[in-house]
Image (cartoon, rainbow, N blue to C red):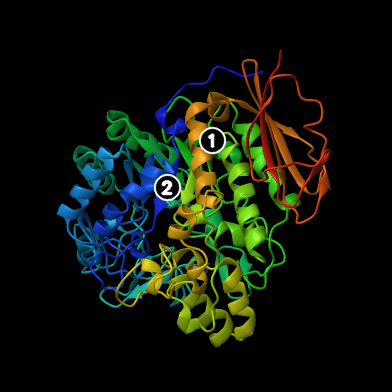
């Protein structure tokens, strides 16, 4: 039976992530912008979403597509001006859509004023804003590999010392142990909240506290040491977030979600505790890493797709173990992940693409937690093809290719490109496919990254003209969430946990029971969950118009609402 759940608007909401560079270009320069987003608010209102999570739009030299910020209180010129942001915020609110900003405060750009000062001398007032170490044996302070390949340390000639960068060398890590850094960050956050924004998605927030000993990491790929055990969920991370909550978050009615690399269920209970002392929820990566952790070609790079047996134990664990203790965030893809239907579904035929996209949507939106939709997911956009590394724009891919193919000859170019087609971040960053016109209606200019060639078949205009499209299926899922409390607050109870093809569970709230079954295979499979339903049971949604007795058809999903009495 259900427990008493604290109600909150962000538990009942559906969030839509926009990657501004690739969403809609209003001025023909090939780069999406804020005015482009504003022009598509009617589309998002028709879909029915409650919140836009906006990937970074701050001033940035764009080494890591905006996640390297040079000024937190200004807008990247590619995207427009602060006036354009203010207009977007006002128009979104008129559409009853909230705006959540991407907060990137583990690191800044090396072109941020703080770092420009910090690197000038060892006694500069801003020196301690970043993490500086003396050389060890004439080289880097330890063996850590950055998340974007190569050493996580960069020597700076001005002082002969090294600074830490867990990502690009143009993304030096901030030193959160310095109270002045925390003061600066919290002041900036309050500034945005006073503007009227509705929350923060916090980039790699689990990495703001490092192991103070900075030990060598276990060597991976025979090249560098793994830094993740020493930079994730560090000794002071909860202390810092509780301070953030006291000084900023508790003053406003916000949605807060932390990207938490390396997070465990037990850690998540601290980050997203029901008492609300830190964040509303976190993103974990266990389900997206389920395949790359085994059978990879090199590092994270793999050509394997996950199967249900990889995914279910992870998802069920997070559902059952957070029950009553913390809140889940639900997602299949985002700007850092490949397209959901290509990774978890089946894009081999048009029929299976549509069916599996709807099945995956059902699977996610009927779990307990707040669902996130990544732009284009609602029309079933797919991964793209990489003919050469020249097709890539993402620093992670380009650096990995250089390290593993060019410099160390650990894999062939062909193997690496196949891996890119499976898991590369650029799969999510190809332009939004609006229609079948030139450049998919995204831009009148040359897009910053090539459009997926399948845009003539997969686009929003076509989806809006087809009542059976993936778009309208997502619209119905969102509407059901808004109308049906058991979808939001019902307790999750796993079913058929040994079935290799069917993912099933029920949700219980009071005397209401929601039974969900999703066939993850391209074959008919037996499933008798719906054979003895009580009188008055109602099918809320399915991706098939007719059903077979005792069987789920390829990628079939069914959701039945019934009563315990």
Q: Is residue 228 left or right of residue 133?
A: right
Question: In percent of the image, x 48 and y 21: which residue is there?
Answer: 6
Given contact means CB atoms under 8 Å apart, are the residues at marks 2 and 1 in contact?
no
**Where does the N terminus fall, quadrant-wise?**
top right
Q: Is residue 264 above or below residue 8?
A: below
Residue furthest top as drawn:
565
Question: In percent of the image, x 28 and y 61: which residue is there?
Answer: 69
**Total numbered labels placed on residues in the image:** 2
Q: Is residue 54 left or right of residue 551?
A: left
Q: Is residue 535 above or below residue 277?
A: above
Looking at this view, is 255 or 277 the one in front?
A: 255
Q: Is residue 552 above or below residue 70?
A: above
**Where does the C terminus fall, quadrant-wise?**
top right
According to the picture, the residue beneath numbered tag 1 turns out to be 369
Q: Which mark is residue 59?
A: none
Residue density around tag 2, few if under 14, some if 14–19, many if 20 or more, within 10 Å: many
Q: Quadrant of residue 514?
A: top right
SS at mark 2 in the image: strand
For the residues carrying marks 2 and 1, which lies nearer the camera in this image? Answer: 2
According to the picture, the residue beneath numbered tag 2 turns out to be 16
Earlier-in-chain disc, 2 versus 1: 2
SS at mark 1 in the image: loop
Question: In percent of the image, x 68 and y 39: which residue is there?
Answer: 558
Tell me residue 374's x, y (percent). Answer: 47, 53
């Amino acid at each position: 039976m259900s427990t008493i759940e604290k109600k909150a608007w962000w538990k009942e909401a559906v969030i839509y992530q926009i990657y501004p560079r690739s969403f809609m270009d209003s001025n023909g320069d090939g780069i999406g912008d804020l005015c482009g987003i504003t022009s598509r608010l009617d589309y998002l209102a028709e879909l029915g979403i409650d919140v836009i999570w906006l990937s970074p739009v701050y001033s940035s030299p764009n080494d890591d597509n905006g996640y390297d910020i040079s000024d937190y209180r200004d807008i990247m010129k590619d995207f427009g001006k602060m006036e354009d942001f203010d207009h977007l915020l006002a128009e979104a609110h008129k559409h009853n859509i909230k705006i959540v900003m991407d907060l990137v405060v583990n690191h800044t750009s090396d072109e941020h004023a703080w770092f420009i000062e910090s690197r000038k001398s060892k006694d500069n007032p801003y020196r301690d804003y970043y993490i500086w170490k003396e050389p060890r044996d004439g080289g880097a302070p330890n063996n850590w590999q950055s998340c974007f390949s190569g050493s996580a340390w960069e020597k700076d000639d001005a002082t002969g010392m090294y600074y830490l960068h867990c990502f690009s060398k143009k993304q030096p890590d901030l030193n959160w142990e310095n109270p002045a850094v925390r003061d600066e960050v919290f002041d900036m956050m309050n500034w945005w909240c006073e503007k009227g924004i509705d929350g923060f998605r916090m980039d790699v927030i689990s990495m703001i506290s490092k192991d103070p000993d900075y030990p060598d990491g276990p060597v991976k790929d025979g090249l560098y040491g793994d830094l993740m055990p020493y930079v994730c969920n560090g000794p002071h991370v909860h202390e810092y977030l509780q301070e953030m909550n006291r000084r900023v978050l508790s003053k406003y009615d916000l949605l807060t979600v932390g990207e938490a690399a390396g997070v465990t269920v037990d850690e998540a209970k601290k980050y997203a505790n029901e008492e609300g002392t830190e964040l509303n929820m976190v993103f974990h990566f266990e389900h997206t890493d389920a395949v790359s952790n085994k059978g990879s070609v090199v590092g994270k790079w793999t050509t394997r797709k996950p199967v249900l047996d990889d995914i279910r134990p992870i998802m069920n664990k997070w559902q059952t173990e957070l029950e009553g203790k913390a809140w889940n965030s639900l997602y299949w893809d985002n700007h850092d992940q490949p397209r959901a239907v290509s990774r978890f579904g089946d894009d081999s035929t048009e029929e299976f693409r549509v069916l599996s996209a709807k099945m995956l949507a059902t699977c996610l939106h009927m779990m307990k937690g707040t669902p996130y939709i990544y732009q284009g997911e609602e029309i079933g956009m797919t991964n793209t093809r990489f003919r050469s590394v020249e097709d890539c724009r993402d620093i992670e891919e380009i650096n990995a290719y250089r390290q593993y193919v060019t410099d160390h000859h650990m894999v062939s170019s062909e193997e690496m490109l196949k891996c890119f087609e499976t898991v590369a971040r650029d799969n999510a960053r190809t332009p939004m496919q609006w229609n079948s016109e030139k450049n998919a209606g995204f831009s009148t200019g040359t897009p910053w990254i090539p459009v997926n060639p399948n845009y003539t078949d997969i686009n929003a205009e076509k989806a809006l003209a087809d009542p059976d499209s993936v778009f309208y299926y997502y619209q119905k899922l969102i509407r059901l969430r808004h109308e049906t409390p058991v979808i939001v607050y019902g307790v999750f109870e796993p079913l058929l946990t040994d079935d290799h093809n069917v993912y099933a569970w029920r949700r219980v709230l009071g005397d209401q029971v929601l039974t969900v079954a999703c066939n993850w295979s391209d074959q008919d499979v037996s499933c008798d969950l719906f054979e003895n339903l009580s009188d008055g049971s109602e099918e809320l949604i399915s991706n098939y118009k007719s059903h077979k007795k005792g069987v789920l058809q390829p990628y079939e999903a069914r959701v039945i609402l019934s009563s315990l009495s």
